[in-house]
Amino acid sequence: KALAIGTSLDFDVVRKLSAGRGRRLLVYWEKDLELWSGNGYQIKPNQKQNDASHLHGLPDLNSTGLFKFTVTPDRLQTFQRLTACFPRERELYRKPLVLVKESPGTEREKGRALLSDVDVAFNQSFFGYSGYGHIHGDLLVRYVHLLVHSNLWMHYALLTSPKLGAECRHFYKSDLDDFPIVPLEKLSEKQEREVTSLSKRLETADKTVFPEIDTFFGSLYGLNALDIEVIEDTLRVCLPYHKSRERACEHPGNPDRRAFCQKLESLLSPFFKVVGKRPEVTPAKLNESLDSQAPFSMLTIGVRGQQGLAPSDSVTNRVLHLASETGATRIIQEQERGLVIGILNQYRYWTLSRARLLAAEILRRHTAVFEEA
């Protein structure tokens, strides 16, 4: 799924997480810490009912749209039913709690999970993790609360969940349970203080906290700036929501193309330097008739200081025809002094991480043309 939705770069990020010092969240929570976790209660009035009197009188959280980051119990009605199909055990509802929404939504600024410092009954729209009885229970639920609001978790869920982005816009509790969380006890005192600080800012809906949450978890898992770039690019264009899909299919603007070309040039420069040359990556302007009918944009790669490449209409026609015939999203055509490249005119193929993949392809298969230039 990682390769189907993302690229080999996304697969490498997931592999890094899996090969790190993490432990499956379910094993860590229920086996190591001996704490409770589970899906919320289910009523299903037309099915066999079981005793739910142990939930009677608890604040009843039965909607994901009531709160953003924390539960305010005074705004909730109490649980009044005496029966439910799956009431779950009373221990699951004990404070402190982190209640993860099964549907993360399009924007984390609207909240993906809730903290509760009171016992609360919650329904099947939430996955609950209780820190009750643990000396660091409050810090543990805050830690998971932060994790769920990180791009790192959303990227992992998107690329590994059999449900999110494949079947619908929800994920299973087992997807989060399988996440390789770094045990809290492996965090330094400084990192624990950072968890508390970031969590308190998130509680107050401080929107400036999200980049710092991403930086914290990126550092915790040993990810570098390029890994973070891959995560951000993939979430921008691959999430199963209208906003993301619309962005993915948009024609890249001139700033997007320039950024792509600049990134590609910077990636190629160290390798050109070995042979005493500098690359020059330039967006190629098609004539108006081609530009209006072609779904591709062209760019050229030559050697700086030499006569610039200007793809002829015949070359451009061949490239675009070949792309249309093969269903390709990218075509590389070797010429006497460099390369002419056609890329499908959708933003998803013009991200900075896609520039990395193109640079790798050029260095692997198309360097000879520059050595002769």
Image (cartoon, rainbow, N blue to C red):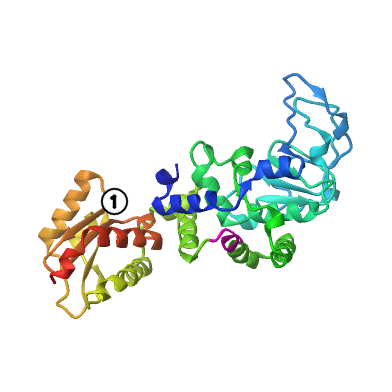
Q: Residue furthest bottom?
A: 305
Q: Is residue 337 left or right of residue 214?
A: left
State the image coordinates of residue 97 (x, y, percent, origin top left): 77, 47
The residue depicted at 35 percent of the width and 66 percent of the height is: 260
Name the quadrant of the N terminus. Answer: top left
Q: Quadrant of residue 219?
A: bottom right
The residue depicted at 72 percent of the width and 25 percent of the height is: 44
Judging depth in this view, the residue of 229 and 111 nearest the camera is 229
State the image coordinates of residue 232 (x, y, percent, origin top left): 49, 59
Residue 219 covered by magenta stretch: yes
Q: Is residue 312 left or right of residue 114?
A: left
Residue 188 visible in image: yes
Q: Is residue 230 left or right of residue 102?
A: left
State the image coordinates of residue 168 (x, y, percent, origin top left): 53, 38
Which residue position is annotated with label 1?
329
Name the quadrant of the C terminus. Answer: bottom left
Tell me the crowding category of disc 1: few under 14, some 14 to 19, or many 20 or more residues within 10 angstroms, Cα based: some
Q: Is residue 210 above or below residue 328?
A: below
Q: Amino acid at mark 1?
A: Thr
Q: Is residue 223 above or below residue 324?
A: below
State the image coordinates of residue 236 (x, y, percent, origin top left): 48, 56
Q: Quadrant of residue 9?
A: bottom left
Judging depth in this view, the residue of 199 and 311 nearest the camera is 199
Give the residues drawn in magenta, as a range.
217-222
Judging depth in this view, the residue of 206 and 292 nearest the camera is 206
Judging depth in this view, the residue of 100 and 129 nearest the camera is 129
Q: Which secondary structure class fits the magenta region best?
A: helix
Label 1: which secondary element: loop
Residue 128 visible in image: no
The residue depicted at 48 percent of the width and 38 percent of the height is: 166
